[in-house]
């Protein structure tokens, strides 16, 4: 089953939606936001599956790479509909790496979070 990362897509659509957002888009700040969203989602679905500092460092590096690719799409002037599709592809590319860092409880919590977000998006 392929999992999408709609939460991150929504964050990037918000950034694309405003010219000011495009100008101040900061890859590291967005990575911190991604981490916060992930951490809160995991805590919500598995309170005893807290991310360790080692996991947070590794995840931040992944989010920075992912966000840089998304920023490059913005800089290239990618049309919004193409941006959404390409962002899904970027998220899918990094999902196995993200999951490889998580333990089983955290993976289950991530899947629950994604399912919850899918319901909200649809």
Image (spheres, rainbow, N blue to C red):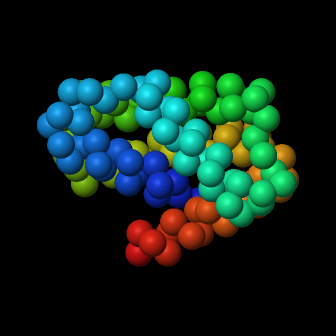
Identify the image quadrant of residue 30. top left
Point out residue 8 in the picture as x, y percentages from the top left corner. Answer: 46, 48
Quadrant for the C terminus in the image: bottom left
Residue projecting furthest to the left: 19
Q: Nearer the viewer, residue 73 or 11?
A: 11
Q: Is residue 22 left or right of residue 94?
A: left
Query: Is the N terminus in the top left, top right, bottom left or bottom right quadrant?
Result: bottom right
Residue 109 position, x and y percent, is 72, 59
Q: Is the residue 40 above or below the residue 58 in the image?
A: below
User: What residue is at 81 percent from the left and 51 percent from the top?
Assistant: 49
Please tell me whether residue 66 is drawn above or below residue 92 in the rendered image: above
User: Which corner quadrant of the image does residue 70 belong to?
Assistant: top left
Instruction: Name the residue located 78 percent from the left edge and 46 percent from the top edge.
Output: 50
Residue 85 at least partly seen: no
Position in image of residue 80 (x %, y %): 22, 50
Q: Is residue 16 above or below residue 49?
A: above
| In-image side of 13 versus 119 (left or right) | left
User: Does any portion of residue 105 appear in the rendered image?
Assistant: yes
What residue is drawn where x is 72% and y is 45%?
99
Q: Is residue 49 above or below residue 3?
A: above
Percent across and percent down for residue 25 are 31, 29
Asked whether 121 or 48 is in front, the reply is: 48
Q: How many marks?
A: 0
Query: From the viewer's perspective, is 73 left or right of 109?
Result: left
Towards the viewer: 54 or 104: 54
* Residue depicted at x 77% and y 27%: 54
């Amino acid at each position: 089953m392929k999992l999408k990362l709609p939460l991150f897509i929504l964050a990037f659509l918000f950034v694309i939606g405003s010219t000011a957002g495009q100008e101040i888009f900061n890859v590291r700040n967005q990575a911190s936001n991604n981490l916060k969203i992930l951490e809160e989602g995991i805590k919500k679905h598995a309170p005893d599956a807290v991310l360790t500092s080692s996991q947070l460092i590794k995840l931040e590096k992944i989010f920075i790479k992912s966000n840089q690719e998304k920023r490059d799409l913005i800089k290239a002037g990618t049309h919004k509909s193409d941006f959404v599709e390409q962002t899904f592809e970027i998220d899918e590319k990094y999902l196995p790496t993200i999951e490889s860092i998580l333990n089983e409880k955290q993976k289950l919590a991530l899947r629950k979070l994604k399912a919850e977000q899918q319901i909200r998006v649809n």
